Image (cartoon, rainbow, N blue to C red):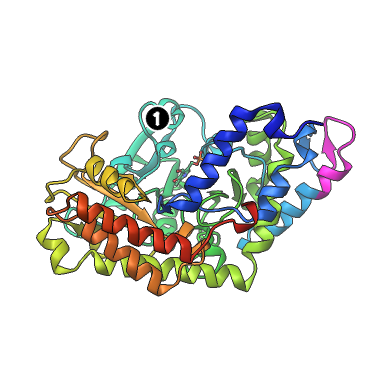
Amino acid sequence: AQPLAEVDPEVAAAVAAELHRQQSTLEMIASENFAPIGVLEAQGTVLTNKYAEGYPGRRYYGGCEHVDVVEKLAIERVKALFGAEAANVQPHSGASANAAAMSAVLEPGDTILGLDLAHGGHLTHGMKINFSGRLYNVVAYQVDRETGVVDMAEVERLAVEHRPKLIIAGWSAYPRQLDFAAFRRVADKVDALLMVDMAHFAGLVAAGLHPSPVPHAHLVTTTTHKTLGGPRGGVVLSTKALAKKVNSAVFPGQQGGPLEHVIAAKAVSFKIAATEEFAERQRRVLEGARILAERLSAPDCAAAGVKVASGGTDVHLVLVDLVASELDGQQAEDRLHSIGITVNRNAVPFDPRPPMVTSGLRIGTPALATRGFQAEDFTEVADIIAVALRPDFDDQTGQALRDRVDLLVKRRPLYPELG
Ligand code: PLP
């Protein structure tokens, strides 16, 4: 019965240091968030001990009566949250959810049509060395060079030419909303199924602040840890007609025992996501991103070669275009890191620099909104970022900006109950 600090001081010290890092810096990685204490607690329970292969009421192990309760709660809550006919809450991650959803409806060699990784798509939508690129014949659509936006005429042209069996709508780095009804019309025209990967914007959908893909798609996948703010994990939503295929694709198709402690934490996060408090937080997520996009479109940014891809944002992130800046993505990421702001470099469409360097930054607001950031805080952080990306940045500017970050960190404390 030894506590962690005694049984393993090395791991305990690294966990404590990570808590301090999260508390003392500004987390602006668009795919990250801070799970509420109730979610952390549920994930740290004895449910981790239980084998529960199968599904509630149909398990391959005894003693599943309590984990059945938990898994049923998670399923019913996520179905209600998104208005879905069926849900599988067992995928260990977003990538596993996508692998399962695709294997439920595709055979190796089938053609899929998804957004190009270099234009904001995800690895699992057809990257060459990912399972998706190895198993399936991949055709990719891109964004329009002028507008930075997905062009549905181009999606339709590629669909008619290549007759994919599955069309994937969804993204990891795209600042606009997709037209799910238009995607469905294209899918119907070529007898394809439509899968929407809403991993990034699921929290906005739950709050009613982003169109829902559920009425339009045959399959909807998501992670639970991004805007949704739950534990690290995945979910597949589907029509009733596909539910059985999805369930057998997840287990035994892709996975063994489900992580019932994580499923418990998912259930808690779905309950929270249905509240007005959650919706209010998502409104601040969007407001923060809009404030950031506006500030980074100001004349001083333009003079520094800093642009906002697609000219703005409809979601929780801004894609910063540094093609004309003397800073590449790596240097910009490092510079923001040096003043206490964590972001990730990201390729922009038609990026002239190599993928390890890139000419862009992906900056998101979900974690700061969870931290309690209000419009005035986002205005301050947007100005800090704009000043940091100027060519006249030096050590003295860096110190002054780090001091401003420290004030924000203190004004909006994170996890005060954890010390
Ligand atoms: N789908 C999209 C659109 C994503 O952005 C991501 C993660 O970045 C994933 C799936 C994969 O999620 P995970 O990292 O949990 O495997």
Tell whether position 65 is magenta. Answer: yes
Choose between 276 and 68: the one closer to the eye. Answer: 276
At horizontal 33% and vertical 46% (from top left) the residue drawn is 337
Percent position of residue 416, x then y? 60, 58
Q: Residue at x 76, y 42 (%)?
A: 45
Q: Residues within 10 Å of mark 1 (few under 14, many from 20)?
A: some
Q: Is residue 176 left or right of residue 106?
A: left
Query: Which residue is drawn at the image coordinates 21% and 56% (left, top)?
Result: 397
User: Which residue corresponds to mark 1?
Assistant: 133
Question: Taking 381 as reference, is 23 above or below it?
Answer: above
Q: Image quadrant of residue 379?
A: bottom left
Side (left or right) of 249 relative to 343 = right
The quarter holding residue 52 reads top right
Residue 103 x %, y %? 55, 34
Question: Please, what is the three-letter code of the amino acid marked with disc 1?
Answer: Gly
What's the magenta region?
Answer: 57-69
Up-down: is 285 above or below 241?
Answer: below
Residue 178: horizontal and vertical position, in percent?
38, 60
